[in-house]
Amino acid sequence: MPPEPDAPPPAPPRTLRTRAIGPDDPLPGVKNILLVMSGKGGVGKSSVATNLTMALSRAGFRAGLLDADIYGPSIPTMLGVAGRPVSLDGKTIEPLARFGVKLMSIGFLLEDPKAAVIWRGPMLHGALQQFMKDVSWGELDFLVMDLPPGTGDIALTLSQKVKVTGALIVTTPQAVATDDVYKSVSMCKKVNIPILGVVENMSWFIDSAGVRHELFGKGGGQAVAEFSGAPLLGQIPLDPTVREWGDKGTPVVQAAPGSEAAKAFIAIAERVVEVADAAHQGEGNDAGPIIDRSGGSGGKKRLPVTK
């Protein structure tokens, strides 16, 4: 089926506080850095990162997506982007773009997209450093980073090199997923990465008769949220359109914004904006400038992160 027509122009973004940006920050023009992560592979983390970024962009925010999964880059496929980044000044790399979102992935730099990346930890560290420092991201309201599964070098590098707004933990409901996701939560706490919230993916499936099936059980997302001390930001149904549009290179939020899955992603993005804003309160003089492209702050809401 063809993509739905673009939605009407979004309401102006609300006023937001921003992360603290130090003198050595590799991303000084980026107001908020969101890590989408999970201790478990196969939970749909890249789908969440891609559609969350698209939802933020469609809401009027300047958004970028960094594919930090060096061994298994998915962003080129999910956003239908092929090509080579170029350098205009011989010093920095220009990110590619799709639907108004700036993009960078190791997948854009591989001669053969089916070739394996066989690197040790220090090479991963160097690549991620380049993707942050040597890419001309410009001014962004949100940079979403799609992290690889597990608790390895990438997350540790980020915790040491950049002040992030926080992490979004992705899980599916069943215990075989949550058992690994708990480890990711524990790592965040040990390296002082704030946890903004939990996203439960593949929460249920609606069959052709309209009957709801909880194929992977239920309650896993809430259990991870309680363990992390952060809110459950939302639940995403198991919807074939997410896979279909992702394989076609157009995220479901862009292709079919009226679908139930897209509505779930959009609602989660709205909550992410709230909790990211709340995470910066109380930072005092270390807080960055205020983002305000709305012409005013009337009706602004704040949702505190659950303690």
Image (cartoon, helix red, strand yellow):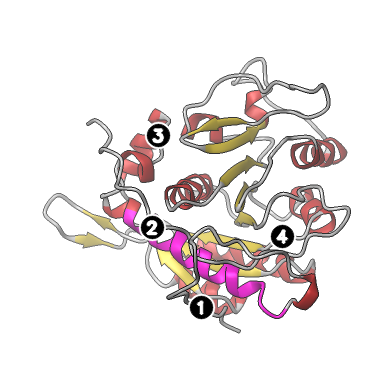
Residue 19 sits above or below residue 228 on the image: above
Which is nearer the N-term, disc 3 or disc 4?
Answer: 4
Which residue was labeled with disc 2? 11
**Image location (x, y in percent) of residue 227:** 59, 77
Instruction: Tell me where the magenta segment starts and ends, as one range.
Output: 263-282
Which residue was labeled with disc 4? 164
Which is nearer the N-term, disc 3 or disc 2?
Answer: 2
Label ID, residue 250 = 3
* Main SS class of the magenta portion in the image: helix
Would you say the residues marked 3 and 4 are in contact, meaning their CB atoms lie under 8 Å apart? Answer: no
Does the rendering let one see residue 238?
Answer: no
Q: What is the distance, in whole Å, between disc 3 and disc 4 at their CAs?
A: 27 Å
**Dot 1, how many residues are within 10 Å of its Cα: few (below 14), some (14-19), or many (20+)?**
some
Q: What is the distance, in whole Å, between disc 3 and disc 2 at their CAs?
A: 23 Å
Would you say the residues marked 2 and 1 are in contact, meaning their CB atoms lie under 8 Å apart? Answer: no
Which is nearer the N-term, disc 1 or disc 4?
Answer: 4
Q: Amino acid at mark 3?
A: Thr
**Dot 4, how many residues are within 10 Å of its Cα: few (below 14), some (14-19), or many (20+)?**
many
Which quadrant of the figure contains the C terminus? Answer: bottom right
Q: Is residue 15 magenta?
A: no
Q: Secondary structure at mark 1?
A: loop
Q: What is the distance, in whole Å, between disc 1 and disc 4 at their CAs?
A: 19 Å
